[in-house]
Image (cartoon, rainbow, N blue to C red):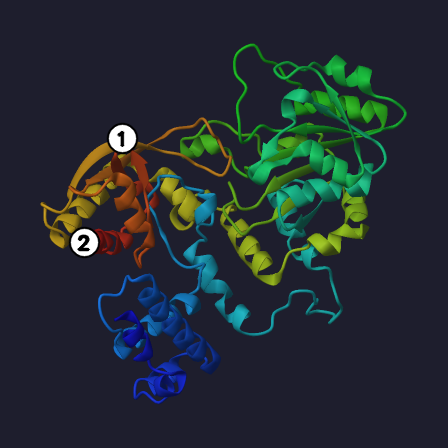
Amino acid sequence: MNQTWLQQLPSMTELLKRRELPALQAAFPQTLVTDALRCGLDQARQSLLAGTATGPVAVEDILSFAEGWLRSVTTPRVRHAINATGILLHTGLGRAVFPGVVVDSIQSALKGYCTLATDPATGDRVERDELLEPLLCALTGAEAATVVNNNAAATLLVLSALAAGREVIVSRGQLIEIGGSFRLPEVMAQSGARLVEVGATNRTHLRDYREAITADTAALMRVHPSNYRVIGFTSEVGTRDLAELARAKGLILMDDLGAGALLPLESFGLPHEPTARESIEAGADLVLFSADKLIGASQAGVILGRRELIRRIRKHPLMRALRVDKTCLMILERTLHLFRDPARLRREHPLYRMLTTPLESLRARAQALTDAVNAAASPVAVTATIRNGTAYLGSGSLPAEQIPSVTVVLQAPGLTAEELARRLRTDEAQVFGRVEHDRVLLDVRTITDAEVALLAAAVGRVVA
């Protein structure tokens, strides 16, 4: 019987003559439509040969498969998602949410030409990273500044430009590994600098650095443990003491702050993190940090410090390979301006707005979400209850800090929590939650009021 059904499959010529084709050809590229029809025919043929088809394959089924295939391959892979994980800087979901005022302000510049590397006053060419220098210096007190495409790149560039072929002294307790298994010793080896480890994992003293200095030493490097914590019997050398030692020995002190705080985090209910200004004032020659963590802007690595060192860094061949594009610069510049006004930062920056949303507001949002879920789906299909929860900053920033939050707990009879979470992720709204104790948790600290209806509708669809 399957052989007869195989012979009944339409040819490509027949499919291309179908009345439904002009609509598909108007919506999708011609070559893709042809590929989709071939895939549809092949899928039908394979199902018949495998014996999984229970009857002859209808032409409408082939066309339906082709249309679904076309939509699948032409839908952007990077698109809006709803972050209900409670992780404010979720690396997998794009880290920082850009402030709306920032996104709105760059649209016209993205649709046309922009002053990326030109001085309007003179018409002369300028280096694009210099556009941000005055603002970064004003916020941090540094003499000069530059920007590259992430903090790992900043580390690689600084070491390559200032310490290639020479020694850099680092505490053993600061030989960090960042996301993607990139380790500081490997970055240092790639730069051509030679790592000199001092101290122990938990305790390093100033004398350890002093005794390790040789005629071949170029720099001391301090790495702030922004993505981990060592607690208990510990000690480390402060920036000011290292700066004095470096100055006395004619060395460079590099301070890698990691997450990159520009303001005291205590005012946002978080523990203190060393700020870039504090590091500069303590005497660091160079300060490095990410722009897409505590700054909450585009992915970039910021390098601050002495003017002569920044000048040497800018002249290094790697600088061109690691420079950022116009979109990154526009987002970063406009986001940095918000830090000049802490009150405006709380209102308009999504990261700081999420951090400071009071629990009463979160409970109201959770209640609105629960009511919306109950309206979108039968209580027989899914139950939604409100529970206290814990959110986290994420992206290696303040890893031990728990942020009080509120969650909506979903349970769907007949569905495991893993399956319910998978359906939510693959729904058109792309909802990402957490799975704990065979329940799906939706943390409302990382969703907006505007997303409540979208999230509830997604729940209704996936349990229908």
Q: Residues within 10 Å of mark 2 (few under 14, many from 20)?
A: many
Q: Disc 1 marks which amino acid? A: His
For this view, does 177 lie left or right of residue 340? Answer: right
Between 120 and 363, the residue placed more toward the observer is 363
Q: Quadrant of residue 167?
A: top right
For this view, does 374 lie left or right of residue 99? Answer: left
Q: Give x and y (percent) for residue 392.
A: 40, 34
Residue 146 visible, this orientation? yes
For this view, does 75 lie left or right of residue 4? Answer: right
Q: Residue at x 45, y 37 (%)?
A: 394
Indicate the secondary structure of the residue bearing disc 2.
Answer: helix
Residue on which the image places disc 1: 437
Location of the C terminus (image quadrant)? bottom left
- Going by the picture, which residue comes out furthest to the top? 233
Q: Residues within 10 Å of mark 1 (few under 14, many from 20)?
A: few
Instruction: Please determine whether, in this image, residue 228 is positioned above or below residue 418.
Output: above
Q: Give x and y (percent) for residue 291.
A: 57, 46
Residue on which the image places disc 2: 460
- Which of pointers 1 and 2 lies earlier in the amino acid sequence? 1
Marks counted in the figure total 2
Between 341 and 378, the residue placed more toward the observer is 378
